[in-house]
Image (cartoon, rainbow, N blue to C red):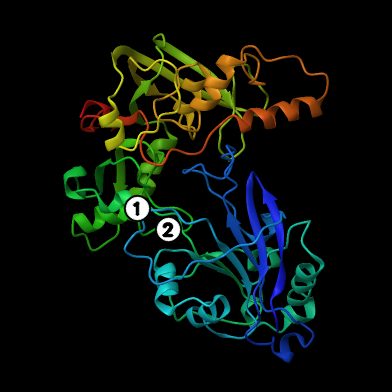
Amino acid sequence: MGSVAVASMLFAGSCRTLAVPAAARALPISLNKHLKLHAFGFHRRNSHTNNAALTGETESITTDAGNLTATSSSLTHPNYDRLLPCPTQKSPPRIEHIVVTEGGPVLEYICKTLNLPNLFVADLIQFGAVYFALVCPKPPPNATEEQIRVFKEVTEPLVLRKRDSIKGKTIREAQKTFRVTDVDQFVEPGTYLRVHVHPKRFPRCYEIDWRSRIIAVEESYVVLDKPAGTSVGGTTDNIEESCATFATRALGLTTPLMTTHQIDNCTEGCVVLARNKDYCSVFHGKIREKKVKKLYLALAASPLPTGIINHYMRPINMAPRLISEDFIKGWLLCQLEVMECRKIPWPTSVVQDEYCVEDCGWPSQDYAYECKINLLTGRTHQIRAQFAACKAPLIGDSMYMPAAIAEMINPGLNPFGKYKKDFTSESEKETDVINWIAQHGKEPSVAIGLQACQISWDDDEHFYRAGSPWWRC
C-alpha cells in the first residue's frame, strides 16, 4: 500500500500537516476486511508567527485527533538515533496519531509504522511521550473522507462488541488516553496511539548543579530553588527532563518526588515537592484552603505604585492569557499586592546573555524596577499578564512585552484595556481580540524577571526563601 498524499491543517496559529504513511500490514479480516489504511498521523510544525496560543508552558495542550484542524505543507523528518544527549537546537513539533491494525508489543508496532529505531522509541516511552486509548477519538470536523471512514470502521458497534478489552466501558471511557509506560505493552487492533516524536526538551536540566538548588529536605517534602528554563513536573510529552526527576536523582531518593504546585518554566524560585502521595494531597488541601503564602520578586520595565491590583482573566486555558480591567461575567478575578517597588540598574547584556534573557525591544533600558509581590490569587501567567496590562511588563517576557509595547504605540489596541473602543457587533470585537492576541510573542526560552522568592504555610510554621534572583547575581 502506497503513501497517501499529505493534507494540511491550521490550528491556533500553528501549522500541522496530516500524513498517512504506507501501511506495513493490512488490518485483519476479523476486525474489518475493508479497511485499507493502517494509520493516520498529524505532524505539527511551527508557523513562525507571533501567535503563541500553543506555547504556554504551564498550560495543558490537548493533542487528541479530535481536537486538531486542517493546512497545506510538506514535512521532511531527520534521522533518528536516541533522545540523549539533549540537542541544543529545537526540533519542529511532530505528533503522530495511529490506529493499530495488528496486535503486538507497542514498541515494535510504532517502530514498524513510523520507521523509527527501537532505542529511539524506547526513549520516547521513558520520556512519557507515547499515549494510548482503547478506542480512537473522533476526528476533527474538517477531517478528510478517508480519515472519517477509518474512524467509522474501527468504531462500528459490531467491531467494538468483539473486543473484550472494552466490555463494560462507554465509548467515552474507552477513548480516554493513558501514558504508555512499558515497551512490551500489548496493543490490540483498533487501539489508538499518540506518539510525540519530538518532545519538548529542557537542555538547562543538564547545566544545573541540582544539589546546590535544594533549600530543605524534610520527612514529607523537599523545597527546591527551581532554576529558570526548567519544568517543575514535566510536560505532556516529557516527564524525564523535569525538576522533580533531577531533584530526586540529586538527593539519591528511591521514591520519585511529586509536584504539589506549578510555576512557569521561565520563572525561578521556591517549589515544594512531596515525598509521598499523602503529603501531596495534604499540600493541595493547604493551597485550596489558602494556607500557603507565596511572595514573588518581579523585575519590571516600569514602576508600579504599591497596593492591590485587580484584573479579570478570560477563562480559556490557552496562552496568552487575556485580562480585563473591568469585571466581565465568567472571567476569573486576578489579585496581587505590590508591597515594594525600588529602582535598580537594568541588567547588563552580560548577565542577560548568561541567563538567555531576551531583548524584547523596550525603548528605555537604563533602569528597571524590582517589585515585591504578595500573590493573592494564583492564576496561570497572572503576574506577567497583570504587569503588562499596567504598562510594566517583566524584563525578558517575550510573550507579554511585545503586546504592551504595541498598545503604548497604539492606545485602544487592547479590546479589554483602559482605552478600549465601543464595538458595534460581536464580530467586530472578535476581530479585535484576534488582532490583540497576535500582538503577543512566543513563550520565553529560559529566564524572565520573575522569582518565587518566598513560600510559607501554616502561619509561617514552614517558611522558606530562595537565593538571590538572577539579576542580582
**Measured Cα–Cα span from mark 1 to mark 2:** 8 Å
Residue 243 showing in the rendered view: no
Tell me the SS state at disc 1.
loop
Residue indicated by mark 1: 242
Q: Mark 2 packing: few (<14 Cα in 10 Å), some, or many (20+)?
A: many
Tell me: 321 left or right of 354: right
Q: From the image, tell me which residue sits under label 2.
A: 238
| Residue in the foreground of this view, choosing between 173 and 37 | 37
Q: Position of residue 289 (x, y in %)?
A: 42, 33
Q: Is residue 295 visible?
A: yes
Q: Which residue is pictured at 75% across the width and 73% down the height? A: 150
Q: Quadrant of the C terminus?
A: top left
The reply, left or right, for residue 106 in relation to residue 26 is: left
**Residue 210, position in %: x, y?**
21, 49
- Residue at the left extreme, as displayed: 212
Where is residue 173? Give x, y as percent.
Answer: 64, 65
Q: In the rendering, at what x and y percent does residue 201 appear?
A: 40, 54
